[in-house]
Image (cartoon, grey):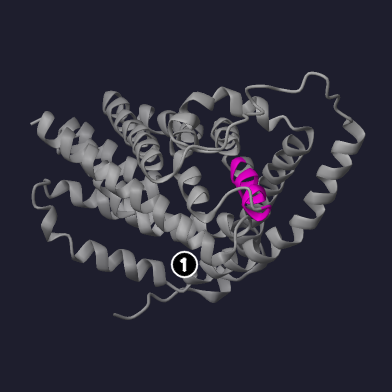
């Protein structure tokens, strides 16, 4: 299948490069840098033990270490800072590779909750009540991922060593703010070049692959091999294809149109959006998560984390979609 042509004059002009590549990359790096700095400051001030206390019961149930509980609580505010915290603990030998993988999966719920208000505010004006169902189903899938991780971690990990510093803080210990902030800044400046060196080239590679049409080829192949989705109405295929090609915004426009004209019922629209979300999982992982994860973890480790994360996400979304399909029939 030939790669779709594009106009180099427009795609690689300075305004286009800044709008489509320069500014998004700068915004990504700034967000990751802020997250890394927050993680380093929290670690240097030893505030992670207070964060760990919030998720301590769930972390103990999962046989996860204290830092995993701190990362879980922090992920409600900043998933990037949570990844930075896990990365530092793994680099210092506090978390094994298995524990890092499970801790990353453990953060599925808070990492999704960060984006839930945006998704809801984007879908509600277009879809109305089906937006509540769609967001509710995706949230249920996130809850299921974290619950599954708790059960899995409890089965394969031994109980963490006794002596929870989050449960028994040393009240006599005083915080030296200047020393802690200097330590955090020194560690941040040591990690920042690695974050840029790994993230920027991968982000540029993703941009080039998109501009030269390789993502479009993959999306077109997927759209031509969807005969197994015969349980959906034909009008739903356009929503799924747009979800693959242009992500949620364009798919919502198509969904709102067919919903208003009566071409699809609210149930059909929800099913189409769920299927589109599932099928776009590989593209989402490669296009969006790989550049950011590579700034915190070694590229091979980042890829393993993404595959596990997105694989579990696809499975959980599939299960929730099947349940909704039969329950709403």
Look at the image and say whether residue 302 sits in the magenta stretch.
no
Residue 184, quarter of picture = top right
Residue found 13% across the figure and 53% down from its top: 229
Task: In this rendered view, identify the residue nearer to me: 158 or 274.
Answer: 158
Q: On the image, numbered disc 1 is attached to which residue?
A: 210
Point out the image quarter for the N terminus: bottom left
Give whichever of 301, 93 is nearer the camera.
93
- Return the x and y of residue 79 as percentages of the image width and height: 57, 40
Quick one: SS at disc 1?
Answer: helix
Task: State the extent of the magenta-drawn residues as a range.
Answer: 82-92
Residue 301 coordinates in the image, percent (x, y):
53, 62
Residue 200 x/y as whole percent? 65, 64
Q: Which residue: 73% across, 35% down?
A: 42
Instruction: Give the residue furthest to the right.
Output: 178
Is 140 situated above or below 284? above
**Left or right of residue 288: residue 271:** left
Question: Seen from this angle, which residue lies furthest top?
Answer: 171
């Amino acid at each position: 299948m030939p790669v779709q042509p594009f106009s180099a004059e427009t795609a690689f002009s300075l305004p286009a490069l800044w709008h489509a590549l320069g500014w998004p990359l700068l915004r990504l790096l700034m967000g990751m840098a802020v997250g890394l700095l927050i993680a380093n400051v929290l670690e240097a001030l030893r505030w992670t033990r207070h964060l760990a206390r919030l998720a301590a019961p769930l972390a103990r149930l999962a046989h996860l270490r204290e830092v995993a509980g701190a990362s879980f609580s922090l992920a409600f505010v900043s998933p990037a800072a949570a990844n930075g915290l896990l990365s530092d603990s793994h680099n210092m030998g506090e978390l094994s590779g298995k524990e890092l993988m499970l801790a990353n999966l453990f953060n599925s719920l808070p990492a999704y909750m960060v984006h839930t208000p945006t998704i809801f505010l984007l879908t509600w004006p277009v879809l109305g009540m089906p937006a509540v169902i769609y967001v509710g189903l995706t949230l249920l899938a996130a809850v299921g991922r974290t619950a599954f991780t708790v059960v899995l971690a409890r089965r394969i990990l031994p109980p963490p060593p006794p002596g929870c510093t989050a449960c028994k803080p040393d009240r006599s210990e005083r915080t030296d703010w200047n020393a802690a902030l200097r330590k955090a800044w020194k560690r941040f400046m040591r990690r920042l070049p690695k974050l840029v060196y790994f993230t920027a080239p991968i982000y540029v590679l993703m941009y080039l692959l998109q501009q030269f049409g390789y993502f479009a080829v993959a999306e077109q192949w997927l759209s031509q091999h969807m005969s197994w989705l015969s349980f959906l109405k034909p009008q739903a295929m356009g929503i799924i294809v747009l979800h693959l090609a242009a992500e949620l915004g364009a798919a919502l426009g198509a969904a709102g149109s067919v919903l208003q004209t009566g071409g699809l019922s609210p149930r059909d629209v929800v099913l189409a959006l769920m299927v589109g979300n599932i099928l776009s999982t590989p593209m989402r992982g490669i296009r969006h998560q790989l550049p950011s994860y590579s700034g915190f973890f070694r590229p091979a480790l980042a890829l393993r984390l993404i595959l596990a994360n997105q694989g579990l996400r696809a499975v959980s979304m599939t299960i929730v979609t099947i349940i909704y399909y039969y329950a709403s029939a």
